[in-house]
């Protein structure tokens, strides 16, 4: 409630709740490590439900509608931002596996924060929102593939990164992926639709909700058995029911549950923050946050210019996507568990990511005055007039 008063994201508020709980001793008082483990398990479930909803809402038609922004803009943004972050990480002395994970994490943005801010500013149908949405779609597609190879990066670093071991693990991973795809296709074509039809005929609402969640958890569990990402299995489960006649009913049932457990994900990330270490490294955290926001804003604005977008469109897209995102925190959490870097580095990465997300709503309000300043200076004057409410339809992407 306090953060809503100053128009900040609820996601940041949940993160701060976790920070307060972790550093006040409350968690130790009610169960210590066991309580922490329980929260992490519920947070994992929240990520699974998030991926399930993303799978349901993924649309090939939407991708075609925003193909220029998604395929060209999104790929260029991920390449530039990811390479820059990875090279900086490598120069700081980290290994290649750690550098690749940081590069991918820093290239991701918070879809939930940016699109919610567009709604709050009544700009959901603007050209800037379409540009940001296109890039966000590509980021979501990218993270699906990256989560598949994430175990390979963490495991290979633990074995010294030997080439023959890496090739062997890659072959095993591809085999597991092929088996999972085959099982998922069977489930999506015959098992899940038949089950939902049978359950729907009972007209028992709670049984239908349980069947939907069971489908999500079931495919995620199969992915886990094959040592693939649980989130990947949940995404495939979402794709399996995306064309179902029950899609809107499923979304209505699953969204409250997803929001509840996703909240616990942000709380669990906040639980990882040690304020003593963060205080000792506050200068590094501020430097990382500034570098992330400035470099990422410049990169995304440059992409907008290359795609022929105006100043206001480019700035809205840049400021809305200049932060780290939900999946950045997830990648840091996984890599931290694999001990790819020190605890101090972990604290700095998580704190700077959360701080950058908190700054997005305020930065987006600067897009209008900054674009007006550029217009007055004659910067790309012929591209400066963006129309916020044109006839093109803007699709929403929640998650």
Image: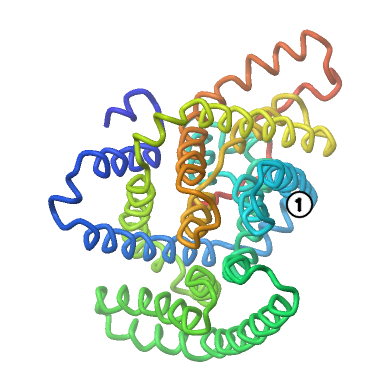
Q: Quadrant of the N terminus?
A: top left
- Residue 308 sits above or below residue 266 on the image: above
User: Residue at the spot x=58%, y=44% of the render?
Assistant: 109
| Residue 324 on image: x %, y % | 56, 42
Q: Is residue 174 above or below residue 335?
A: below
Residue at 75% x, 47% y: name it.
83
The percent position of residue 341, horizontal first and vertical second, equals 54, 52
Q: How is the image coloured?
A: rainbow
> Image quarter for residue 60?
bottom right
Question: Could you tell me which residue is drawn at 76 percent across and 22 percent down?
Answer: 385
Res 95 quadrant in image:
bottom right
Instruction: Identify the residue shown where x is 47% and y is 42%.
Output: 344
In the displayed structure, does residue 260 sit left or right of residue 51?
A: left
Which of the pair 197/323 is nearer the observer? 323
Answer left or right for 364 relative to 256: right
Choose between 24 and 157: the one closer to the eye.
157
As drawn, which residue projects farthest toward the left?
Answer: 29
Q: Is residue 47 left or right of residue 137?
A: left
Residue 16, x across and y down, in percent: 33, 37
Work out whether 335 lies above or below 233: above
Q: Residues within 10 Å of mark 1 (few under 14, many from 20)?
A: some
Front residue of 176/74: it is 176
Residue 115: give x, y in percent of width and height: 53, 41
Name the residue carrying label 1: 75
- The number of discs equals 1
Dot 1: what SS?
A: helix
């Amino acid at each position: 409630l306090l953060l809503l008063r100053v128009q900040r994201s609820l996601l940041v508020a949940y993160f701060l709740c976790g920070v307060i709980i972790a550093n006040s001793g409350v968690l130790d008082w009610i169960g210590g490590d066991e309580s922490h483990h329980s929260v992490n398990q519920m947070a994992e479930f929240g990520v699974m439900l998030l991926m399930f909803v993303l799978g349901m809402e993924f649309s090939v038609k939407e991708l075609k509608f925003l193909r220029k922004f998604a395929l060209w803009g999104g790929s260029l943004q991920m390449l530039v931002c990811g390479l820059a972050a990875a090279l900086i990480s490598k120069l700081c002395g980290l290994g290649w596996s750690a550098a690749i994970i940081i590069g991918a994490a820093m290239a991701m943005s918070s879809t939930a924060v940016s699109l919610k801010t567009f709604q709050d500013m009544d700009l959901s149908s603007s050209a800037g929102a379409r540009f940001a949405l296109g890039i966000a779609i590509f980021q979501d597609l990218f993270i699906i593939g990256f989560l598949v190879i994430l175990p390979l990066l963490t495991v290979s670093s633990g074995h010294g990164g030997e080439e023959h071991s890496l090739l062997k693990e890659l072959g095993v991973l591809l085999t597991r992926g092929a088996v999972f795809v085959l099982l998922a296709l069977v489930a999506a074509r015959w098992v899940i639709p038949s089950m939902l039809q049978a359950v729907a005929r009972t007209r028992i609402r709670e049984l239908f909700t349980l069947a939907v969640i069971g489908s999500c958890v079931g495919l995620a569990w199969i992915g886990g058995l094959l040592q693939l990402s649980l989130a990947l299995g949940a995404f495939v489960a979402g794709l399996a029911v995306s064309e179902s006649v029950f899609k809107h009913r499923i979304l209505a049932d699953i969204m409250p549950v997803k929001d509840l457990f996703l909240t616990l994900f942000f709380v669990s990330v906040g639980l990882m923050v040690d304020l003593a270490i963060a205080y000792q490294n506050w200068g590094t955290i501020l430097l990382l946050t500034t570098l992330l926001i400035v470099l990422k804003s410049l990169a995304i604005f440059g992409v907008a210019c290359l795609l022929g977008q105006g100043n206001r469109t480019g700035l809205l897209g840049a400021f809305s996507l200049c932060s780290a995102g939900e999946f950045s925190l997830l990648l840091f959490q996984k890599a931290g568990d694999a001990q790819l870097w020190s605890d101090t580095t972990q604290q700095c990465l998580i704190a700077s990511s959360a701080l950058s997300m908190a700054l997005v709503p305020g930065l987006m309000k600067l897009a209008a005055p900054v674009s007006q300043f550029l217009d007055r200076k004659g910067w790309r004057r012929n591209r400066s007039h963006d129309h916020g409410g044109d006839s093109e339809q803007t699709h929403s992407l929640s998650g």
